[in-house]
Amino acid sequence: MTTSLDTPLLPVSLTAGKLPRYTPLAVLVVSFVVVGGLLSLLGSFSVALTVVLGAIVFAVALVLISRMVEGGRAAKDRLATTLMYSAFILALIPLVSLLWTVISNGVQRFDLYFLNTTMRGVYGGMDAGGAYHAIIGTLEITAFATVISVPIGLLTAVYLVEYGPTRLGKLITFFVDVMTGIPSIVAGLFAYALFALFFGPGVRMGVVGSVALAVLMIPVVVRASEEMLKLVPNELREAAYALGVPKWLTIVKVVLRTAAAGIVTGITLSIARVIGETAPLLLAAGYTNSLNGDLFDGRMMTLPVYVFRSYSQGLVPKGITDINYQRAWAAALTLIIIVMLLNLVARLISRFFAPKTGRR
């Protein structure tokens, strides 16, 4: 009698019932070629339509082929993977398009002369002037707004997380939620009205713009810091209390140090949120063609307002020279570079302050 041990073993292939690794790429290329060819024959070819229809044909064809070869479970997995990559690419398209548009239009005027020159004495369609005064104004106003908002937002988050849900805490949470949805123009009107009580109507100063931006930054800082503080394990707090460390020192040395990376990221996001605001700064800080480095005396120009005014002036003279558009695009490129540098600095700071893990 033959037992199961005497039965010869059949060779098992680990790649049986699987599509080759190059199948998705091949199906994608064939889908685009077929769709592009059909649209060309119909006389309605366009790159955007070819990409959209080609992606749909690719998803359907890949799922059908996978279902026939690999089975229904693998087909569902490939469909989910295709949808995930499609969503990722769709999210990248506006970003890449925006960067390409700003860089291609702004690089024409972006040079050292533009970065080191103000608009003082520049009129009409003169091929001169730069955004130095706007860069200085943006950095000073945003920096002072950060000085105002970060301590308030961070201390508020510490109170909400570390001292428990109280009636005051619930009230603060409610007002933070309300402030999150405040339109930027309302923040500018609030700052203008506040300083108009002391300095009279028509007041325009850099510090007024900083207060307006701080109103917009505070709820973002509170929310980001609050979420990061909640991620700190309670075991760390309890271990510090067991060693006799006071609560305030535990917050400073343990909690804030552990959440430092996330807090810095949240602060950077709040800065990026307000650095491009135009309406509140136009109301609160005004505009000028000259350099003004004093936040507490006179009007100050900022990059968003500089872009707005340059673009609104249009072609001069009589639709011949586009120098204003060139300045606007170059200022927009400068603003993007500043935001990118801020994010880079935030990454470095978060890496430096992040708690060290593992043993040396």
Image (cartoon, rainbow, N blue to C red):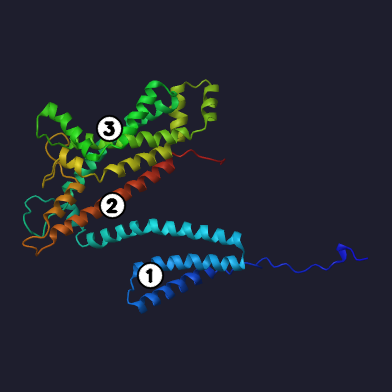
Amino acid under disc 2 = Ile
State the residue lying farthest toward the front. 42
* Residue 274 placement (x, y as % from top left): 27, 42
Q: Are marks 3 and 1 in contact (CB under 8 Å)?
A: no
Q: Can see residue 293?
A: no
Q: Nearer the viewer, residue 182 or 317?
A: 182
Q: CA distance from mark 3 to mark 2?
A: 23 Å
Amino acid under disc 1 = Thr
Q: Is 188 located above or below residue 83 in the figure?
A: above
User: Mark 3 packing: few (<14 Cα in 10 Å), some, or many (20+)?
Assistant: some
Residue 213, by quadrant, is top left
Q: Are marks 1 and 2 in contact (CB under 8 Å)?
A: no
**Where the C terminus falls, by quadrant?**
top right
State the residue lying farthest toward the bottom. 41
User: Mark 1 packing: few (<14 Cα in 10 Å), some, or many (20+)?
Assistant: many
**Which residue is under mark 2?**
336
User: Mark 2 packing: few (<14 Cα in 10 Å), some, or many (20+)?
Assistant: some
- Between disc 1 and disc 2, the foreground one is 1
**Which residue is under mark 1?**
50
Q: Nearer the viewer, residue 322 or 167?
A: 167
Q: CA distance from mark 3 to mark 1?
A: 51 Å
Residue 76, label in figure = none
**Which residue is under mark 3?**
148
Element marked by disc 3: helix
Q: Relative to residue 302, is residue 61 drawn left or right?
A: right
Element marked by disc 1: helix
Residue occupying image coordinates x 45% and y 72%: 31
Amino acid under disc 3 = Ile
Instruction: Give whichever of discs 1 and 2 has the lower sequence position.
Output: 1
